[in-house]
């Protein structure tokens, strides 16, 4: 390859690098909003995030990026670029085409409204009052619908919702997902009914023993270290904090997880920590040579979730895992779990029983939670249901599944 082609490619990557650095800074601000931010700060925080989104938008829509992309694409030796280089160019070009169609004001307003809506959701949840949440959610849905209709054209998708799905699961239309979910739903319902009808059921009372929150914090730290998520050494790239809804955020050398604690349900934090550590380990084990390049980002949320649920369920609910970890758990909890039998414990944590709370769901019923949300999102974006109708439709869905 000639020098001019590589020179243009390197210039392009240099410009894109600023975008990744800025996005990583925004992720820390999001983390702080969910973990440490004082309640009064939400107005300022929403404006900070709006400004950051404006700057990100200006970076990716810089005409110089468009010029460099075109210069590279028409170069006679373009086909000699390797697979990684061509993938980088494809992803940069895709993002450039999409973002240049979105108005900067809309991008900023979505970032601002998302922060406000999440904050109000927490208050509405605590008060068990949907009416507090409703107007903020309506505004956010309207903004998302505006963006979806714009992106639908540039992405050439069949529906606005497909344009939003593409952000998380590229080239996966709702029609395909509906077919897959339809088959999964029938299989899950059959399996759930079989589990519920079984004459032998686990004794789950051992999972309801009260364990102090301070002790649970130590359990979470120990689990994290046990699965390879370093939060203690001088080379640590992670940390564990507490939030209303567990999540993972960060980039390469700074990937943070959160969990929550309930004294009467210690396994909630055990499995949410395992789940979020799965997300974090995926992020931290991306090829370090690809840092600040589009190829060095998760390929899809479906793949990301497969890694988190692998650690949570395939590893974390296995007998082999607890052969090693149950003695550690007993040591951390003193006499509270000292008489727990290994097989009884493993049997209990693998119980299958429908629950209305997704993050507490067992690995069999969890899929139905996802299907319900997917169906509601489709109908909401297509204006088949309104935000006002959402609670009623939500409740009916949970009566119907199964």
Image (cartoon, rainbow, N blue to C red):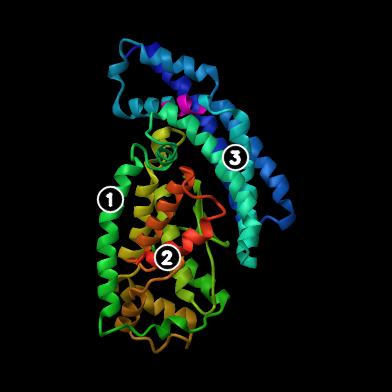
Q: Which residue is mark 3?
A: 110
Most foreground residue, 74 or 362: 362
Residue at 49% from the left image edge and 20% from the top image edge: 65
Q: Residues within 10 Å of mark 2 (few under 14, many from 20)?
A: some
Going from N to C along the chain, the mark reached first, 1 or 2, is 1
Q: Which residue is mark 2?
A: 398
Circle on res. 218:
none
Residue at 63% from the left image edge and 64% from the top image edge: 129
Q: Secondary structure at mark 3?
A: helix
As drawn, 103 above or below 281: above
As measured in the structure, the alpha-carbon distance from the residue carrying label 3 to the one carrying label 1 is 31 Å
Extreme right residue here?
40
The residues colored magenta run 94-99
Dominant secondary structure of the residues highlighted in magenta in the image: helix
Instruction: Give the percent coordinates (x, y) of residue 232.
Output: 51, 61
Q: Which residue is mark 1?
A: 180
């Amino acid at each position: 390859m000639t020098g001019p082609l590589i020179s243009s490619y390197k210039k392009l990557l240099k410009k894109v690098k600023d975008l990744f650095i800025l996005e990583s800074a925004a992720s820390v601000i999001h983390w702080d909003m969910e973990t440490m931010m004082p309640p009064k700060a939400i107005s300022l925080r929403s404006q900070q995030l709006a400004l950051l989104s404006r700057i990100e938008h200006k970076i990716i829509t810089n005409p110089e990026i468009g010029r460099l992309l075109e210069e590279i694409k028409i170069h006679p030796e373009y086909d000699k670029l390797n697979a990684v280089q061509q993938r980088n160019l494809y992803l940069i070009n895709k993002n450039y085409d999409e973002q240049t169609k979105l108005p900067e004001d809309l991008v900023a307003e979505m970032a601002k409204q998302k922060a406000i809506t999440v904050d109000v959701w927490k208050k509405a949840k605590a008060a068990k009052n949907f009416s507090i949440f409703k107007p903020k959610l309506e505004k956010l849905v309207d903004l998302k619908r505006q963006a979806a209709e714009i992106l639908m054209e540039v992405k050439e998708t069949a529906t606005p919702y497909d344009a939003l799905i593409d952000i998380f699961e590229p080239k996966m239309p709702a029609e395909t997902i509906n077919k897959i979910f339809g088959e999964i739903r029938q299989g899950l319902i059959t399996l759930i009914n079989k589990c519920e009808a079984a004459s032998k059921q686990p004794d789950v009372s051992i999972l309801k023993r009260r364990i102090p929150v301070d002790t649970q914090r130590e359990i979470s730290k120990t689990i994290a270290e046990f699965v390879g998520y370093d939060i203690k050494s001088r080379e640590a790239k992670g940390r564990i904090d507490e939030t209303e809804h567990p999540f993972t955020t960060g980039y390469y050398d700074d990937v943070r997880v959160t969990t929550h604690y309930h004294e009467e349900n210690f396994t909630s934090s055990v499995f949410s920590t395992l789940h979020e550590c799965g997300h974090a380990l995926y992020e931290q084990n991306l090829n370090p040579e690809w840092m600040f390049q589009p190829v060095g980002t998760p390929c899809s949320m479906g793949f990301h979730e497969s890694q988190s649920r692998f650690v949570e369920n395939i590893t974390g609910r296995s007998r082999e895992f607890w052969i090693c970890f149950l003695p550690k758990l007993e040591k951390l909890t003193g006499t509270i779990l000292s008489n727990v039998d290994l097989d009884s414990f493993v049997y209990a944590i693998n119980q299958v029983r429908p629950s209305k709370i997704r993050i507490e769901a067992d690995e069999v019923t969890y899929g139905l939670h996802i299907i319900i949300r997917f169906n509601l999102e489709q109908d909401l974006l297509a204006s088949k249901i309104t935000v006002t109708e959402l609670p009623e439709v939500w409740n009916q869905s949970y009566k119907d599944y199964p």
